[in-house]
Image (spheres, helix red, strand yellow):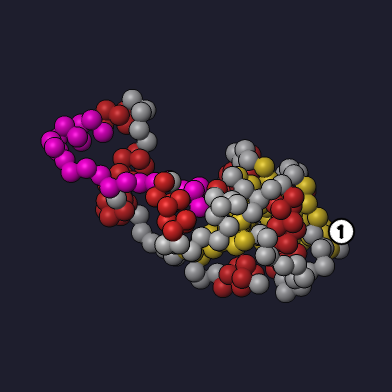
Amino acid sequence: QRWLQTAALSGALNMPNFARDPSRYTAVKWITPKWEWVDPLKDRQAERIAQECGWKAPSDIIESEGYDELGRCLDSKGYKVIDPTHVMTMDLETAGTCSGGTAITTDYFYKEWIDSFIRCNSIQGKFVETAKAKLNLITVDVIVASVVADTNIVACGYGAIEDRYVGFYDIVVDPGYRKKGYGRALMEAIIAGARRRGASRGYLQVMDSNEAARRLYLG
């Protein structure tokens, strides 16, 4: 963090509003270069003991080796890249509105919203309970948004707020009601709710192939 402050104050990095709100820049996990092995065998044994005792997570051990080692580990377990993704961010202070505010929001998940979420996403079979369990595991503040048309929820999504960031999740519109601006209305309602709760930035992870979601986010 001292390095980051020096870089900002010296102008070496362009970091708008750093002095007023450094949290958007400091909310990262710093991974320093690993020292070279002194005794490779003992180092590996120590890592295994630390993992077995619960002192270190497997992800921490892999991260300390660097991203190349992470790639080799995933390859060895049979993981493959299916569809690359982008993490897109935005400044909530400059995000505009234009949809007319047709979405409504609550700060909790409720049965009608969950049922619509499952229907709009075409979730079936055993995955229904998995989807419900995923929502129940969320412990941070949420903004649950929906659009109602013809007495039914036809578009839904939610934002999760943590450390002045809001993440946009599962923004979906029923296929029969698309191209009516409902997705935009959901985003704007979540952004407005996040601002009221003190969030200053938003983010969305989206697959490269999902052009519709990327256009929605970019405006």
**Could you tell whether 123 is left or right of 180 in the image?**
left
The quarter of the image holding the C terminus is bottom right
Placement of 154 over or under 199, stated as above or below: below
Q: Position of residue 139 (x, y in %)?
A: 62, 38
| Label 1: element kind | loop
* Position of residue 190 in the picture relative to residue 70 (left or right): right
Q: Residue 76: where, in percent of width, then height?
A: 27, 51
Counting from the top left corner in percent of width and height, residue 176 is at: 74, 70
Q: Is residue 26 magenta?
A: yes
Residue 145 located left or right of residue 73? right
Which residue, as the protein is rendered here, is positioned at the far top? 53
Which residue has dot 1 on it?
151
- Report which quarter residue 83 is drawn in: bottom left
Comparing 19 with 132, the one in front is 19
Work out whether 171 lies above or below 49: below
Q: Residue at x 70, y 57 (%)?
A: 191
At a point 35% along the width and 40% down the height, the residue shown is 60
Residue drawn at point x = 18 percent, y = 43 percent: 36
Whether residue 102 is visible, yes or no, is yes
Q: Amino acid at mark 1?
A: Thr
Viewer-proximal residue among 41 and 91? 91
Residue 124 visible from this viewpoint:
no
Above or below, 11 relative to 50? below
Relative depth, front residue between 110 and 121: 110
Camera-nearest residue between 170 and 94: 94
The residue segment tinted magenta is: 25-47
Name above or below for residue 25 compared with residue 38: below
Q: Estimate how packed mark 1 is, as few (under 14), some (14 to 19) or many (20 or more) residues with alpha carbons within 10 Å.
A: few
